[in-house]
Image: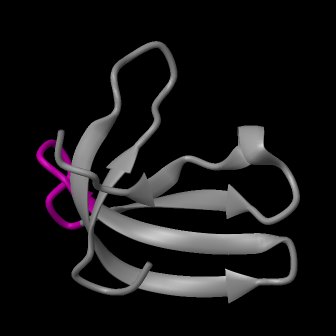
Amino acid sequence: MKVNDRVTVKTDGGPCRLGTVLAVEPFNEGVMYLVALEDYPLGIWFFNEGDHPEGIFVEPYREA
């Protein structure tokens, strides 16, 4: 995923939320995504772990 991509974000106890990637920062353990959500238009950071599928919080948006 890259800047300006539409994504969905998993959050605790709720449905996936739609957002837009504002920045991407790779790390050894995974990737940080700064995502603009409706409640956080300036962005909030989410970390996707590289080795653990349960640690994936940001995914590409796929229209139904």
Above or below 35: residue 59? above
Residue drawn at 14 percent across, 60 percent down: 41
Q: Which of 60 and 57 lies nearest the eye of the viewer?
A: 60
**Secondary structure of the magenta portion, mostly?**
loop
Q: Give the quadrant of the C terminus.
A: top left
Pinpoint residue 43: horizontal percent, then vertical percent.
28, 64
In the picture, measured across the screen, residue 56 lies left or right of residue 20, that is: right
Please check the rendered image and state whether residue 37 is part of the magenta-colored stretch, yes or no.
Answer: yes
The magenta segment = 36-42
Pinpoint residue 9: horizontal percent, then vertical percent.
40, 45
Instruction: Give the farthest residue toward the top.
Output: 13
Residue drawn at 44 percent across, 78 percent down: 1
In the picture, measured across the screen, residue 40 lies left or right of residue 11, that is: left
Residue drawn at 76 percent across, 83 percent down: 27
Above or below 12: residue 53? below
Q: Quadrant of residue 26?
A: bottom right
Instruction: Give the farthest residue toward the front.
Output: 64
Q: Quadrant of residue 21?
A: bottom left
In the picture, measured across the screen, residue 38 lies left or right of residue 27, that is: left
Pinpoint residue 33: horizontal percent, then vertical percent.
48, 70
Pinpoint residue 17: horizontal percent, then vertical percent.
27, 38
Q: Which of 64 and 39 lies nearest the eye of the viewer?
A: 64
Q: Which of 29 and 6 lies nearest the eye of the viewer?
A: 6
In the picture, measured across the screen, residue 42 lies left or right of residue 15, that is: left
